[in-house]
Image (cartoon, rainbow, N blue to C red):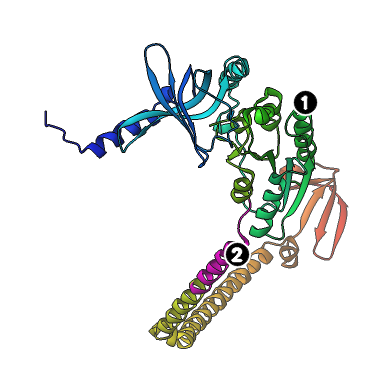
Amino acid sequence: MKDRIYTVTQMNRKVKEYLEGNSEFSNFFLKGEISGINYYKSGHLYFTLKDNKASIKCTAFGYKMKGIPTDLKEGDRVKIFGKITLYEVNGTYQILVAHVEKEGSLGKLFEELEKTKKELLNLGYFDKSNKLSMPKLPQNIGIVTSGTGAAVKDIINTARLRYENINIYVYPAKVQGIGSEKEIIKGIEILDNMEEIDLIIAGRGGGSVEDLWSFNKREVALAYYNTKTPIVSAVGHEIDNLLTDLTADLRASTPTHAAELVVPRKDLLIRELESRRNHLNRNLKNNLKKKKERLEVLGKNYILRNFYGSIGEKNNILISYEEKLSRILKTNLVKKKHQLEIRSEKLNSLNPEEILKRGYTITKIGDKLVSGVEDIEKGDNLEIIYHNGRVVTRVEEIKR
């Protein structure tokens, strides 16, 4: 087997890719005791999590944005939620912390959340095949979020900057605390039943895990899933996936990002249309040029140049055929007429009246024709027919 030789950088990178690509090392809980904790002005938090046999370094970037407590101290027993990464410079691995809870606070909620996720996953609620496609050019957008927070302003401003003609409908809803789940669900249902709405953005800005928990509720997640209108989950957070992120048709990392994902830039659309128009014009000109060149080639064609002469020759040939046919028909008519006259003369010669005119007669006894003397008895009344009359006589004597 050929030796594999790596640089230190290459090896650290491979280990980093392995650790971060392994689902076992992503989105897990870890319990332990805090040691060597340091809050920095930069907004980052560093500490070590240990038990009685081992320790591991932990880092929480932007800890305030994640809602991580600011009063953690040495010896606190905590449960953290995060994933493993490797710091390539010195080859040490650490936990990137998304959430920290002091022992006994949110543990049960996270356990229930994981249980719900597994249940909905097995039922197919997260399947890509069930996701609706976003419209390419939405005209009317519905928003479900707090009516006074920064999220609604961010969505509206971003959407209007990208496409000022877009219409925006806002359903102001409570997005955290008691009753927030019902308001979010109601807002989604109302906008979903408006025929003019092309898509819905539902969410909020960042906050602590507690602030965002409404979007981890089963009934809210199912409201996202059951819409007939495409819906975007737009909740600003560092946790990998809220429950609504998984059941929505599209996930955005922040409300601003949601507007960027679903509203196209008008200037780019116009540029694309101009490009397509220019492309069509070029194609049209090229086609016209080819047709013109084809016509010029056909114009030089011998057959086309002598087209009318060819037609004249064809007409002469047809006229010759017509005359010949007429002569044949006339000849046949003369022959048929002569044959008819001959047959007519024969029929006339056999006409009884003509025979009678030549001196012959017809003799009858009643309705019976007399063909010879043997048909006559003495005393019979004979009817003798001439061409110009008839005679009735009685037989007195028969000579045989």
Spot occupied by residue 107 in the image (x, y as percentages of width and height) = 59, 16
Q: Residues within 10 Å of mark 2 (few under 14, many from 20)?
A: few
Q: Give the residue number, with chain letter if any, for mark 1.
A: 178
- Visible in this render: residue 278? yes
Please determine whether, in this image, residue 301 is positioned above or below residue 147. below
Q: Give the residue number, with chain letter if any, for mark 2.
A: 267
Q: CA distance from mark 1 to mark 2?
A: 43 Å
Q: Amino acid at mark 2?
A: Asp
Residue 58 vs residue 115, the one in the foreground: 58
Residue 375 found in image quarter? top right
Spot occupied by residue 307 in the image (x, y as percentages of width and height) = 46, 85
Quarter of the image that includes the N terminus = top left
Which residue sits furthest top? 52
Q: Amino acid at mark 1?
A: Ile
Left or right? Give the position of 149 relative to 234: right
- Residue 265 belongs to magenta span: yes
What segment carries the magenta color? 263-282
Please determine whether, in this image, residue 353 is positioned above or below residue 222. below
Residue sitting at 57 percent across and 78 percent down?
Answer: 330
**Comes first in the chain, label 1 or label 2:** 1
